[in-house]
């Protein structure tokens, strides 16, 4: 049976949750954190980067990094 | 289910009003609604059982993760002590002005602490002169230098076994 994912796409951070055993549970991202920065970037090698990785490279690549300020 | 219960669920009009066909139709409708209810209960039970199996699997994985990284918080707290040593050593002029006996002693304490942390699986992330990698580092400023190469590590990062527990803060070169 498929699960439903709930996404909170916030202006600064986003979060994803499922319902398990009748209780909502936030899912951790690959970095192990429960929220992910709402930032998207295109790297110098034309890769799409999102979240924490996009935030970490923002200073080196401001023209191709998008976030709400 | 007793005959009395069946009769309580299925209301028949008086014997003169309901024909055998009507009775049969009512029983068939009742059977259909019972089958629908049974199907709902079965699906609900299957879903709850699947949730329980998933929960047990996740619980086991969580326990395994906790066992593997039980010392992570303590190690991370001690990293700030390593940072203090790095700051003391970074000012070469001041450090050299300290008497040799004190310097050797403090350097030995630093080595001892680092050795203990390494025995728990801690390794440094010090990517100076390497290509900037956002998986390992966070760029805090750009400076003149080779494009996208780390020119200075402002604060070292650390890895505990396979997990990056702290990214390095770096200055990145820009043409």
Image: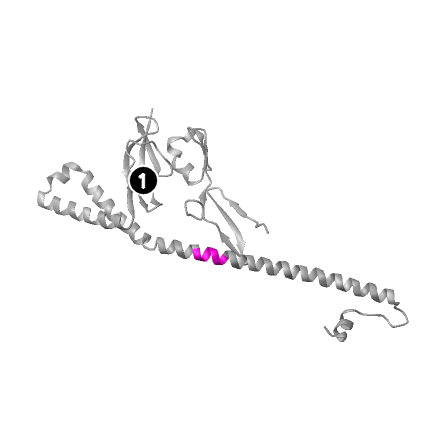
Residue A63 in sight in this render: yes
Q: Looking at the picture, how far across and down is residue B96, in whole percent?
A: 12, 38
- Location of residue B172 with respect to A29 vertically, above or below: above
- Residue under the image location 39 percent in, 34 percent down: A57
Q: Is residue B47 left or right of residue B97?
A: right
Residue A66 in sight in this render: no
Residue assigned mark 1: B168
- Dividing the picture into quadrants, the one containing residue B164 is top left
Q: Which residues are magenta?
A: B55-60
Dominant SS in magenta:
helix
- Dividing the picture into quadrants, the one containing residue B86 is top left
Question: Which image quarter holds the N terminus of chain B?
Answer: bottom right
Tell me the SS state at disc 1.
strand
Q: Looking at the picture, how far across and down is residue B99, in whole percent?
A: 9, 43
Question: Which image quarter holds the C terminus of chain B?
Answer: top left
Q: Looking at the picture, how far across and down is residue A24, in whole percent?
A: 52, 55
Badge 1: few (under 14), some or many (20 or more) residues near its Cα, within 10 Å? many
Q: Is residue B17 left or right of residue B73?
A: right
- Residue under the image location 83 percent in, 63 percent down: B25
Q: Magenta stretch: residue A63 in it?
A: no
- Counting the numbered discs, the total is 1
């Amino acid at each position: 049976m498929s699960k439903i994912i709930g996404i909170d796409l916030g202006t600064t951070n986003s979060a994803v949750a499922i319902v398990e055993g009748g209780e909502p549970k936030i899912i951790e991202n690959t970095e192990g954190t429960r929220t992910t920065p709402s930032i998207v970037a295109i790297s110098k090698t034309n890769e799409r980067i999102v979240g924490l990785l996009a935030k970490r490279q923002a200073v080196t690549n401001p023209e191709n990094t998008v976030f709400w300020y | 289910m007793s005959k009395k219960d069946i009769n309580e669920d299925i209301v028949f009009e008086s014997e003169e009003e309901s024909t055998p066909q009507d009775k049969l139709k009512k029983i068939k409708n009742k059977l259909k609604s019972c089958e629908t209810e049974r199907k709902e209960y079965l699906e609900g039970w299957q879903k709850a059982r699947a949730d329980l199996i998933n929960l047990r699997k996740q619980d086991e994985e969580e326990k395994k993760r906790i066992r593997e990284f039980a010392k992570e918080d303590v190690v991370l707290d001690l990293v700030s002590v390593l940072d203090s040593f790095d700051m003391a050593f970074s000012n070469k002029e001041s450090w050299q002005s300290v008497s040799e006996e004190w310097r050797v002693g403090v350097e030995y304490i630093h080595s001892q602490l680092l050795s203990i942390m390494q025995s728990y699986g801690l390794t440094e992330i010090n990517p100076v002169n390497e290509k900037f990698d956002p998986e390992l580092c966070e760029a805090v400023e750009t400076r003149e230098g080779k494009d996208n190469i780390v020119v200075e590590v402002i604060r070292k990062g650390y890895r505990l076994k396979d997990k990056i527990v702290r990214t390095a803060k770096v200055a990145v070169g820009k043409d």
